[in-house]
Amino acid sequence: MYGRLAGRRLPFLYKAPEEGLKVSALCGGRNGLYLEGSICGIPCLMLVDTGANVTLVRRDLAQKLKGNFIYTTPNISLKTATGEKAEIHGKLDAAIECGCRKFQHRIYVADITDPCILCLDFLQKFNFTVDLEKNEIRTGGEEWPLFSASAEHSKLCSVLAKEKTIIPARSECLIQGVTEVSGKFRYAVTDFPSQVSQKGVLVAATLVDLKREAIPVRVLNLDNKPKTVDKGAVIATCEPVVDIVARPQEFSESLRLPLILENLEGLNEEQRTAVKELLQEFQNLFSASDSDVGRCNMTQHRINTGNHPPIKQYPRRLPLAKKEEAERLVKEMVDNGIIEESSGPWASPIVLVKKKDGSTRFCVDYRKLNEITIKDSYPLPRIDDTLDALNGSQWFSTLDLKSGYWQVEIQPEDKEKTAFTTGQGLWQFKVMPFGLCNATATFERLMETVLRGLTSEACLVYLDDIIIVGRTFQEHLNNIPDGIKTDPEKTKAVVDWPRPETVHDLRSFLGLCTYYRRFGRNFSAIARPLHKLTEARSNFNWTEECEKSFNSLKQALITSPVLTYPRTDKEFILDKDASNEGIGAVLSQKIGNEECVIAYFSKSLGKPERNYCVTRKELLAILKSIEHFHHYLYGRKFLLRTDHASLRWLLNFREPEGQIARWIQRLQKNDFEIQHRKGTSHGNADALSRRPCKESCKHCTNAEKKFGMETDISVKVLTTEDAWSSSEVQKAQLKDPAIRPILERKLNSEDRPSWQEIAPESPATKRYRALWDSLHLKDGVLYRKWESDDGSSCRWQLILPKSRIQEILRETHDSASGGHFGVMKTLSKTRERFYWDRRRADVEKWCRECHACGARKGPKTRTKGRLQRYNVGAPFERMALDILGPLPVTTKGNRYVLVLMDYFTKWPEA
């Protein structure tokens, strides 16, 4: 479907081809010019309209002329702007009198506002001339005055609010109104009256029927604060409208609606009728041709380039064959009001791109302009979140805006920045063109403003695509298959894709496949041979393995399974597996008696990861798959199924080290139950072959020794509790000879001990005495109050007894939370809670002597001296020496050789 943001379509008058009549535009109202005369002796005011060519008379006036009224229905139909069909009730041959002249002419009877409308057929038949300067009409030497409508006819009608209404901030809503004037004709709702107009409020132009009990008025609040409309307040004005617009034959109802309904074969006759009525009611919103593009006045696109000087680029030379095409496209955009001539200092070149259907796409290269444009960071919605929001919906309506960007105007002062040249003049866009860096942000902001107030359960928007969802047909009148699956039209292109011959062609194919990776299992593993060919230092050598991967990718895409939407009331099931090449996972839910897939995840392993043992790979698969599906699994208990039994032991290992410890810590925030099942039952996560572990792998060895028969466990969120009571810590401090004198003095007195009293004690005690003012008691335990230099932060540090130092260092460095970090990070962690004498030296010694850290660190690279050139002028002026060895021990017990060489003569000695 094609839609548009704004714009009003005038009512349509359709004709059958055999009638031979063409109807143009007839406009009445307060600005019309009228001629005083009579029809068959009945006086009336006749509207003169040179824009239409079928003369009409009002039905009540025609009924007074029963002798002349022919009730046969002609093959002409009148269609209003709301899509409702208004019949022409007949025709008559009447005498139209102007002054003393009579003119015999055929006129048609319809429900119009004015008594009669004199159109082009009448004016041309009798050679009438309309003089707008003198406001008169003449023929055959006679002239008659033309005058505007009476004050009563042009009087505006006020629309009053039926109930008190609050319009939310930056939202649109419908307010029910009542009119002061009753009638049976439609009225066009205009803007707020000037005397009560509120800032930041817009009223949409709408055709309404005064025969209805209430008039719907669409009001938009552009402010950031709600606005209140009281009952009885004037919310809009309306005036009579008689607009009749001619449309070519191809837009008649009999030919137009089947084009829209051709894709609705899945509906029954009742549903198709409902869709037809809905489209008829709102048919003025749909584009009738490529040039029929609406305009929106709610926003204007801004190109903020700051103080940067204008950028002028010379036009690129076009082939002669493309010059004519470029001129044709420019003329077409000028005729459609898209571009206009420019006289500014800006200029960008154009690019003509060939489409798949053979037509040409007109593009402007705005890269230089985009580089100096200040970026708009308004976010685009994630497509994944949009698809997830379709949960439970079975009926969908999709609206695609007709040239959505071209419906947004550009700020007048920025139009010249969009200027382009083809070599034949300088043109600028009046609307927002494609290729501007902030165009998507402007358009998404506009769409969300227009649709604000509609919940995500009813309406979703992504740029110019609008999805209206519903659970029943009564809510929405369109139908698509349930679930998410790959578009068969796009997969057809994959099936016909030729074998890539270059890296560029291969990257194009992989780019298309990556779009569908959510719909295919184990995408990264299948595509790995092709990805290797795109690496920088790889030769493009198409092997049998590449051919197999290429065909497998195409087959996987066109046979991809249908995915379902996540259900918040069902438990999630995560199946994962790992192989030598990659890891994969399947997220599903059990709905009824079947497990329905929600999404797939796959990732290729890097070179270091491929060297992991099986257990590490399986744990990495758990970590990566849970983090990938974090937005589904966080805060919910879920079932994790694996075919690697040792993971039960690994996740409960009391003293993990290094990388394993950090991985386990990242998993603790999730609440899941692990279930082991055989590899034959684990096919949905691809039960891949595994590389045997080395005999020295302690993780797998320990797992084999300690793993029992149980397969189902629950992993809860773990917390570390401080088991040290105040009494136990105080006893440990009193047993420490360096802390005891300070603690006893604090317990018995607030006075600092004198130097004579502290002189016999150890150096550590003397250093604690120097900290007397910052030492305090809390529950009988000695603490140090530490403050930052600027006084912005304060921390209490426990004075740690010597007997507890190793335990703390083991926790801050060796434990799962310690992670075997270096000296500075370990020191920073201990400083947060503890203080003791010679703390830095102890931390450095602990990290230096840690066996786990030493085993993981390679030998330090020996530094090499910078090569230099020495100028020597005589033998033995300068000598070079080095020690060679160690060598096998000689009989004399020697194993090193001293080597000397003269710089001048190069004479060696050993």
Image (cartoon, rainbow, N blue to C red):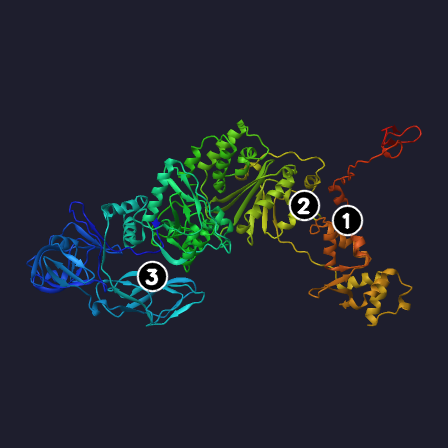
Residue under pointer 1: 847
Q: Nearer the viewer, mark 2 or mark 1?
A: 1
Above or below residue 185? Residue 634 is above
The one of 381 and 758 positioned closer to us in this rendering: 381
Q: Dot 2 corresponds to which residue?
A: 659
Amino acid beneath label 1: Cys
For this view, does 463 lie left or right of residue 779? left
Q: Is residue 538 left or right of residue 189?
A: right
Secondary structure beneath dot 3 equals loop
Q: Earlier in the sequence, mark 2 or mark 1?
A: 2
Q: Are marks 2 and 3 in contact (CB under 8 Å)?
A: no
Instruction: From the top left corner, tell me how far across and down residue 147 is, in percent.
Output: 18, 65
Position in image of residue 180 (x %, y %): 26, 70
Question: Can residue 389 be seen in this snapshot?
Answer: no
| C-alpha separation, residue under disc 2 versus residue under disc 1 | 17 Å
Q: Quadrant of residue 459?
A: bottom left
The foreground one among 113 and 453 is 113
Question: In the visual, does 862 lie left or right of 80?
Answer: right
Badge 3: how crowded within 10 Å, few (<14), some, or many (20+)? Answer: some
Q: Residue at x 53, y 27 (%)?
A: 544
Query: Image point 35% across, 42% down: which residue?
Result: 327
Q: Position of residue 905 (x, y in %)?
A: 86, 29
Residue at image mark 3: 204
Q: Nearer the viewer, mark 2 or mark 3?
A: 3
In front: mark 3 or mark 1?
3
Amino acid at the residue labelled 3: Ala
Give the Cα distance between marks 3 and 1: 73 Å
x and y percentages locating residue 520 in the rendered image: 49, 39
